[in-house]
Amino acid sequence: MTVKGVNYIIRAHENEVKNSKIRMGKNMKSVIIGIAGGTGSGKSTFTNRLRDEFKDNVAVIYHDNYYRDQSDIPLEERKKTNYDHPDAMETELLVQQLQELKEGKSIQCPVYDYTQHNRSGEVQTVEPKKVILLEGILVLADERLRDLMDIKIYVEADADERILRRVIRDVKERGRDIEGVVEQYLTTVKPMHYLYVEPTRSTADIVINSGMNSTAFELVKNTIQKILDSEE
Ligand SMILES: Nc1ncnc2c1ncn2[C@@H]1O[C@H](COP(=O)(O)OP(=O)(O)O)[C@@H](O)[C@H]1O
Ligand SMILES: O=c1ccn([C@@H]2O[C@H](COP(=O)(O)O)[C@@H](O)[C@H]2O)c(=O)[nH]1
């Protein structure tokens, strides 16, 4: 099963007791940082670098985990779903859970299985933290999510580089074949990108060229450190 963030959550859970200092205090305000960008742009790479840097001091939420449950649809049909349209996501649940995190409550986040095109049935506990990273292709496309964010980031990369990376990743990690990736890219991923993802670039506070951009990483890292160090 390929699951974004699950290792992090397990580690976060194990360290929870040890790290009581990093729990959110009752009156502490949490800062939500949205990290958007097209498929293969390097969003997860950038997000996971921050997660590795700050470990349990930040909560990380992947919008992909909120793809709708499709247990009532056979796998062959699930393969045909348009996963790049905002309606494919249960964003209403994400909005509700982000509000709960902001109120200092822990949440039970769904866990998605890309190989099955479906929720895995598992959930992961996410504890409230002062900084919440929210990653996904469409996180800037939803006004409710944008309104909850304090900092909006868009990771950019050329379309040819993105699709090349996606082919390799989807074959290696998400149980796909090359023909399937190309077919999906041309029929849904590419048109939805230009309809729903790319237009959100203009809503971002910061546009980053590549998820491996060290200068951008240092700037965002320093900003997060300041937030974590502040008394508020
Ligand atoms: N700047 C880069 N140069 C080369 N490979 C990259 C770069 N950024 C990301 N990758 C690789 O491309 C793949 C997709 O990156 P990922 O961060 O998962 O993209 P996204 O989350 O935006 O879909 C991963 O295998 C990652 O290691
Ligand atoms: O069941 C699924 C769910 C999603 N996808 C594709 O995933 C990408 C989003 O993930 P990235 O890590 O940002 O690439 C999206 O483009 C969907 O097409 C899928 O193929 N199957």
Image (cartoon, rainbow, N blue to C red):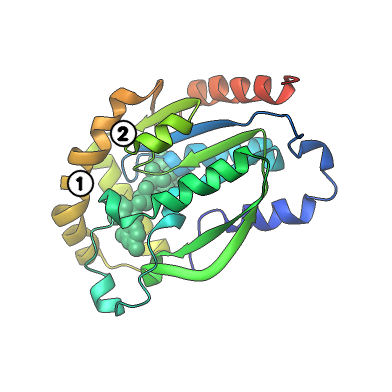
- The percent coordinates of residue 165 (x first, y second) are 33, 48
Question: Which type of secondary structure does the marked residue at label 1 adopt?
Answer: helix
Q: Work out whether residue 107 or residue 181 is closer to the camera in this orientation and state it.
A: 107
Picture layout, residue 24 above or below residue 173: above
- Mark 2 sits near ligand 1, with its Cβ under 8 Å away: yes
**Marked residue nearer the N-terminal end (2 or 1):** 2
Residue on which disc 1 sits: 192
- Compared across the picture, whether 19 is left or right of 182 comes to right
- Quarter of the image where one finds residue 58: top right
Disc 2 residue crowd, few under 14, some 14–19, many 20+, Cα 10 Å: some
Quarter of the image with the C terminus is top right
Q: Work out whether residue 217 or residue 72 is closer to the camera in this orientation and state it.
A: 72
Identified at 65% across, 28% down, the residue is: 29
- Compared across the picture, whether 37 is left or right of 23 comes to left
Indicate which label's residue lies in the foreground, 2 or 1. Answer: 1
Residue on which disc 2 sits: 157
- The percent coordinates of residue 228 (x first, y second) are 70, 26
Question: Which type of secondary structure does the marked residue at label 2 adopt?
Answer: loop
Residue 72 in sight here: yes
- The percent coordinates of residue 164 (x first, y second) are 28, 48
Amino acid type at mark 2: Ala
- The percent coordinates of residue 171 (x first, y second) are 34, 63
Picture layout, residue 204 above or below residue 56: above
